[in-house]
Image (tube, coloured by chain):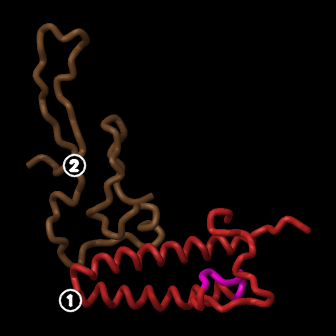
């Protein structure tokens, strides 16, 4: 099974008369909380300093909304 | 009047205080919807205790953080001395 990722993709309609070379596969990023539902207990956490910079206490919700070309870096810096 | 220079440990302690405050905010929001999560409550109380100690230490060195009785005042009345929160 492919590795789970927040980045989803879809294929827009490509017309033969498109003025510019059309983008065949478009990607978009979905927030992690879509996949969590009611938050379970004992989720892994960042330590205090990391959490301050990551913007969340729980690792599963960390989502810096990378651009498609940026490498998907993990963890709070 | 010489330009007031903040020592390095001011910033270290302030960052630590901000980190603990952030954890407390996150845990408060979490506990609002998970009232019976014992481990999170334990963590919350640990951080609340650590914050009180750090606040005391911080205020002895750098003056009051809050007002209206949330912080002791130095002499003379010094809660409005620079730097203000947006100036540090």
> What shade does chain A have?
brown
Q: Which residue is drawn at 35% across and 70% down?
A: A57
Of residue B40 and residue B35, the one placed in the foreground of this image is B35
Which chain hosts label 2? A
Crowd rating for badge 1 (residues with CA inside 10 Å; few <14, some 14–19, many 20+): few
Residue extending farthest front: B68
**Residue at numbered disc 1:** B36
Q: In this view, does B69 lie above or below B20?
A: below
Residue B58 percent coordinates (x, y): 64, 83
Q: What stretch is highlighted in magenta?
A: B60-67
The dominant secondary structure in magenta is loop
Secondary structure state at the residue bearing disc 1: loop
Residue extending farthest left: A1
> What shade does chain B have?
red
Tell me whether the residue at label 1 lies in contact with that at label 2, contact meaning CB atoms closer than 8 angstroms.
no
Which chain hosts label 1? B
Residue B17 percent coordinates (x, y): 54, 77
**Magenta residue check for B62:** yes
Residue A38 percent coordinates (x, y): 15, 71
Q: Which residue is drawn at 40% across and 60% down?
A: A76
Please tell me in which quadrant of the rendered image residue A46 appears: bottom left
Q: Do discs 1 and 2 belong to a common subunit?
A: no
């Amino acid at each position: 099974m492919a590795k789970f990722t927040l980045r989803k993709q879809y294929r827009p309609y490509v017309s033969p008369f498109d003025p510019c070379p059309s983008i065949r596969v478009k990607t978009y990023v979905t927030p992690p909380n879509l996949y969590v539902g009611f938050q379970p207990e004992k989720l892994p956490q960042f330590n205090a300093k990391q959490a301050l910079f990551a913007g969340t206490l729980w690792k599963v919700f960390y989502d810096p909304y990378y651009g498609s070309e940026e490498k998907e870096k993990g963890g709070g810096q | 009047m010489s330009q007031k220079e903040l020592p390095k440990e001011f910033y270290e302690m302030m960052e630590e205080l901000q980190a603990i405050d952030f954890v407390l905010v996150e845990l408060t929001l979490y506990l609002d919807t998970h009232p019976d999560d014992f481990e999170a409550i334990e963590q919350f109380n640990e951080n609340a205790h650590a914050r009180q100690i750090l606040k005391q230490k911080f205020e002895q060195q750098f003056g009051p953080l809050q007002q209206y009785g949330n912080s002791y005042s130095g002499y003379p009345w010094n809660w409005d001395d620079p730097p203000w929160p947006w100036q540090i």
